Amino acid sequence: MNHRHRKIVHAIFAHPIPANLDFKEVENTLKELGADIEERNGSRIAVTLKGRTVLFHHVSHSVPKDEVVQIRRFLIDCGVAPEQYPL
């Protein structure tokens, strides 16, 4: 995992919740963590990581804060923590 991906992981877990995360960068970071991403109808994507699947709304701009919280919870459920990826 490169430095950019590690920065995104730390940003997802940051307090306060960031409002400027680029969706493509988050998507690429999830792929780097080993997630399978599948396009669904209605501009949704299914993300599967370590046997868990969640749906996210695909946006063309910054990820909304409530969705950052969803991504954070999903990563915690999958056993991902920012401490595993030091900057």
Image (cartoon, rainbow, N blue to C red):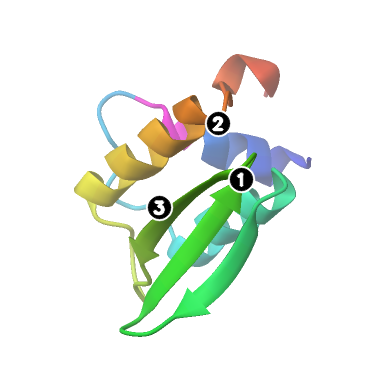
Percent x, y of residue 54: 42, 52
Residue depicted at x 42% and y 28%:
13
For residue 49, the mark is: 1
Quarter occupied by the N terminus: top right
Q: Dot 2: what SS?
A: loop
Residue 85's quadrant in the figure?
A: top right
The answer to whether the residues at label 1 and label 2 have Cβ atoms under 8 Å apart is yes
Magenta region: 10-14
Is residue 86 visible from the viewing direction of this image? no
Residue 23: where, in percent of width, then height? Answer: 44, 63
The residue beneath circle 2 is: 78
86, 68: nearer the viewer? 68
User: Mark 3 or mark 2, which is nearer the start of the sequence?
Assistant: 3
What residue is disc 3 on? 21
Give the SS element for disc 1.
strand
Classify 10 Å Cα crowding around label 1: few (below 14), some (14-19), many (20 and above).
many
Residue 87 covered by magenta stretch? no
For the point 67% across and 24% down, which residue is it?
Answer: 87
